[in-house]
Every structure is written in structure tokens, then in C-alpha cells.
């Protein structure tokens, strides 16, 4: 299960990994917390499009359906309203009723229900900074972490179904400074103009997170790119992302990265190459969720 703030986030963060696991026979569910209603039209070709302006929420739902089909994933909307990205100095207040202002227990309860229905072995979400400081990204981090804990607690949200213990929670850090720097330098060395020149210079001082897992997924970059293009209002097909030659990207950075945040099973030392490593396929008895590491069950990879 991958928890995201807006439609299109699932296609720019961890998308090739999702497509790989689907191709290997695993179920992958993307949970999108908001409808992206307040997103701007970022594709110059669609600026002023009357159909989109009349019904941005509906248009983005159709985009999300096309992206889900491209990746082969399952998808569900959590049902909250996009907070928008406040700009200005000082920042304006967030709009009333938006996701970032919801009492935490409301979206947590909604996500707990999805966890208990889908019963994922592994979850991914953003780090505590949201990957970048969008209020919905930060809120989705809080919701995902709280729901990871609550879903296994029989006393929490009893109306949301039978408890289920997710075994591992990862932060998706695949869109990292390290990745951009590596691709940027590789393009420069080959005499190719890098589309990341300005991006890299303005973001190079962002915090660097230490990856604990690298999933090789370069064979699924085409599915990722198709999913991105499906979000036509949000992705410029002539933009910087598509200016990187895919053969260079596959050579320099053929994987997506994750950082283990929490686990209820033993995790081997070193860099993992599979988010399902060590997972107990039949799931964990909820009564054992709180056991110390040395008492936790050891299991093999989830069967594809």
C-alpha cells in the first residue's frame, strides 16, 4: 500500500517499483488522500482549457484512472479536499475544510479502514517533511504513520474492521537530491545539457536521507512515464523530467529508494533490494505485534 497526498504523486514517487511488484504478481494499492482539486494546470498545452476549468476534480479523477491502468495498480480515494499550496509572505491561512486542517483522527480512521480491508504486508509514505513541505504531504505522513500503528490495535477504531499488522513501513525517498545529482553529473560528463541545472542549484542543500532499500525497476520506467503523462494537467510532456535520456537514467540510477521507518519483523543489516524481504506471507498474529525483535517471527519473501 502506497499512501499519497494528491493524484500524480503516485506516478512521480515509487511508480516503477509499484509496476514491478504488480508484474511479479503482487497486489499494490495506492491510497490518494485528496482529489487534487486545487492543483494548478502545469501543462502549457492545456492552459485555459474550458473542459478542465469547468470540472478540475472530475478531470483529475479521469487522469488518475488512466495512471492506475498504466501501472496496473489498484486505487482508492480517501475522500479529503486538497489544501492547495499557500504562497506569499506571510503565508495565507489554509482554506476551511481542507485535508491539512482535518482533526487527525478523522483521516486516520479512514486509512485504518483501508488497511484492514486490503491487509498490506508493506506500506510506503512520505517522511516527516512530506518529501517537500506541502501541507497535504506533511499531513499524509502523519496520517500514514498513525494508521500504521492504529490498524494493528484491536482497541483503535473497532468500527473499521478486524485488526491488521502491517509488517514494514517505508518512507519513499526516490525523488532525492542524490538521484538528481547523479543524473545531472552524468549528463554533464556526456556533454548533454542537463534539465536539472536550476533545480539542483536551488535544492542541493535539502536534507539527505539515508536509503535502506534500493529496488531495481528500470524495466518499468516506461510504465512510470506513461502514468506521469496520464496526469496531463500536472505534467508538461516537454518538461525537464522527460528531457533525460532513458538509457542514461537506466545506466546511472536504475532503481528507486526507500528508507525503513518502522518494522514489526526482523530486518537484515545492509541495503535491501526488495521491500518484501523478510515478510511473513500469512501475516502476523495481532497478539504478537508488540513483541521485542528477538521474539518476532522470521519469514521469507512474499510469494509473487
Image (cartoon, helix red, strand yellow):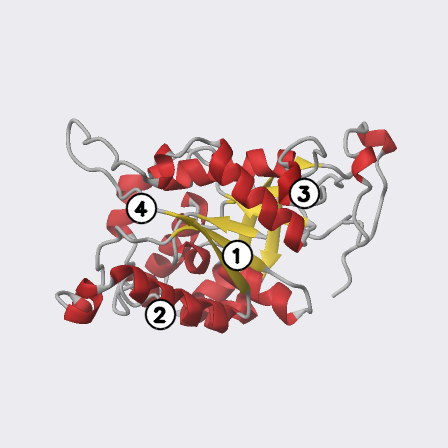
Task: Say whether residue 94 is left or right of residue 297.
Answer: left
Res. 200 mark = 4
Residue at 80%, 49% in the rendered image: 280
The quadrant the C terminus occupies is bottom right
Res. 229 mark = 2
Q: Nearer the viewer, mark 2 or mark 4?
A: 2
Residue at the far left in the pictured view: 48
> Foreground residue, 122 or 269?
122
Q: How many marks?
A: 4
Task: Give how far across and how far down residue 104 sits, in percent.
Answer: 47, 32
Task: Give how far across and how far down residue 19 sits, in percent.
Answer: 56, 66
Q: Which residue position is annotated with label 3?
A: 168
Question: Which label's residue is closer to the chain start, 1 or 2?
Answer: 1
Question: Which label's residue is closer to the chain start, 4 or 3?
Answer: 3
Mark 4 residue crowding within 10 angstroms, few (<14) / some (14–19) / many (20+): some
Mark 2 residue crowding within 10 angstroms, few (<14) / some (14–19) / many (20+): many
The kind of secondary structure element at disc 3 is strand
The kind of secondary structure element at disc 1 is strand
Res 206 quadrant in image: top left
Image position of 21 with respect to 266: above or below: below
Q: Nearer the viewer, mark 1 or mark 4?
A: 1
- The Cα atoms of the two marked residues, 2 and 3, are separated by 30 Å
Res. 128 mark = none
Question: Which label's residue is closer to the chain start, 1 or 3?
Answer: 1
Image position of 158 with respect to 73: above or below: above
The kind of secondary structure element at disc 4 is helix
Task: Give how far across and how far down residue 170 sits, in percent.
Answer: 59, 43
Q: Nearer the viewer, mark 1 or mark 2?
A: 1
Question: Which label's residue is closer to the chain start, 2 or 3?
Answer: 3
Mark 3 residue crowding within 10 angstroms, few (<14) / some (14–19) / many (20+): many
- The Cα atoms of the two marked residues, 1 and 3, are separated by 16 Å
Amino acid at each position: 500500500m502506497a499512501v499519497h497526498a494528491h493524484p500524480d504523486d503516485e506516478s512521480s514517487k515509487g511508480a516503477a517499483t509499484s509496476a514491478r511488484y504488480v508484474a511479479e504478481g503482487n497486489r499494490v494499492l495506492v491510497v490518494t488522500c485528496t482529489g487534487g482539486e486545487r492543483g494548478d494546470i502545469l501543462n502549457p498545452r492545456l492552459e485555459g482549457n474550458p473542459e478542465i476549468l469547468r470540472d478540475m476534480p472530475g478531470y483529475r479523477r479521469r487522469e488518475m484512472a488512466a495512471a492506475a491502468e498504466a501501472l496496473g495498480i489498484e486505487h482508492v480515494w480517501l475522500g479529503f479536499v486538497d489544501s492547495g499550496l499557500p504562497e506569499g509572505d506571510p503565508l495565507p491561512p489554509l482554506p476551511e475544510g481542507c485535508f491539512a486542517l482535518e482533526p487527525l483522527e478523522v483521516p486516520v480512521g479512514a486509512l485504518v479502514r483501508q488497511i484492514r480491508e486490503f491487509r498490506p504486508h508493506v506500506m510506503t509514505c512520505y517522511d516527516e517533511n512530506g518529501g517537500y513541505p506541502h501541507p497535504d504531504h506533511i499531513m499524509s505522513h502523519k496520517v500514514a504513520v498513525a494508521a500504521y500503528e492504529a490498524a494493528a490495535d484491536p482497541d483503535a477504531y473497532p468500527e473499521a474492521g478486524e485488526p491488521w499488522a502491517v509488517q514494514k513501513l517505508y518512507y519513499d525517498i526516490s525523488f532525492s537530491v542524490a538521484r538528481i545529482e547523479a543524473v545531472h553529473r552524468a549528463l554533464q560528463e556526456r556533454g548533454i545539457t542537463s534539465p536539472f541545472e536550476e533545480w539542483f542549484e536551488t535544492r542541493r542543500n535539502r536534507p539527505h536521507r539515508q536509503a535502506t532499500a534500493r529496488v531495481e525497476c528500470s524495466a518499468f520506467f516506461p510504465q512510470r512515464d506513461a502514468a506521469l503523462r496520464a496526469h496531463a494537467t500536472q505534467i508538461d510532456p516537454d518538461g525537464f523530467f522527460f528531457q533525460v535520456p532513458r538509457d542514461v537514467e537506466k545506466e546511472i540510477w536504475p532503481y528507486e529508494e526507500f528508507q525503513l521507518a518502522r518494522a514489526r519483523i526482523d530486518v537484515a543489516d545492509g541495503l535491501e533490494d526488495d521491500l518484501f524481504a523478510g515478510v511473513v506471507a500469512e501475516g502476523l498474529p495481532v497478539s504478537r505485534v508488540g513483541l521485542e525483535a528477538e521474539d518476532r517471527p522470521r519469514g521469507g519473501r512474499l510469494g509473487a
